Image (cartoon, rainbow, N blue to C red):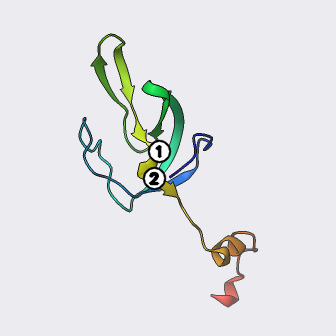
């Protein structure tokens, strides 16, 4: 599960794309998504909004129109192997190496 303190721009992977009260919202298991923001939701919970999927708005009396996000437990952080992280810090290969 991701944290409520996850900053915008963080890439996360979907681990639970099961349908909730409003359907799946377009989630696909194993897909990588980018956190747009995490908001406080009803009942002292948190919801994540994603760059790749448009937010769903529904009418919920007595609050009126509310934006529906995804539960944090549906995602985990994208683990990048240390060897790939090291490659990101290296200089570009010269043409004769290719």
Q: Where is residue 55 in the image (x, y as percent from the top left)?
A: 37, 32
Q: State the residue position of label 1.
A: 72
Q: Is residue 41 visible?
A: no
Residue extending farthest front? 43
Circles 1 and 2: CB atoms closer than 8 Å: yes
Relative depth, front residue between 26 and 16 = 16
Where residue 85 sits, quadrant-wise, is bottom right
Q: State the residue position of label 2.
A: 75
Give the vertical position of 80 relative to 25 (above or below).
below
Residue at x-position 42% and y-position 41%: 71
In screen coordinates, is 20 left or right of 94? left
Q: Is residue 74 visible?
A: yes
Residue at x-position 38% and y-position 25%: 67
Q: Position of residue 65 (x, y in %)?
A: 34, 16
Q: Position of residue 68 (x, y in %)?
A: 37, 30
Q: Quadrant of the C terminus?
A: bottom right
Residue at x-position 69% and y-position 89%: 96
Disc 1 from disc 2: Cα separation = 6 Å
């Amino acid at each position: 599960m991701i944290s409520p303190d996850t900053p915008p721009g963080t890439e996360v992977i979907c681990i639970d794309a099961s349908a909730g009260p409003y359907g799946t919202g377009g989630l696909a298991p194993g897909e990588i998504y980018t956190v747009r923001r995490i908001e406080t939701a009803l009942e002292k919970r948190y919801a994540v909004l994603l760059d790749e999927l448009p937010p769903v708005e529904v009418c919920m009396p007595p609050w009126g129109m509310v934006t529906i996000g995804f539960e944090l437990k549906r995602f985990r952080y994208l683990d990048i192997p240390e060897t790939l992280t090291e490659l990101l810090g290296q200089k570009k290969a010269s043409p004769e190496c290719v």
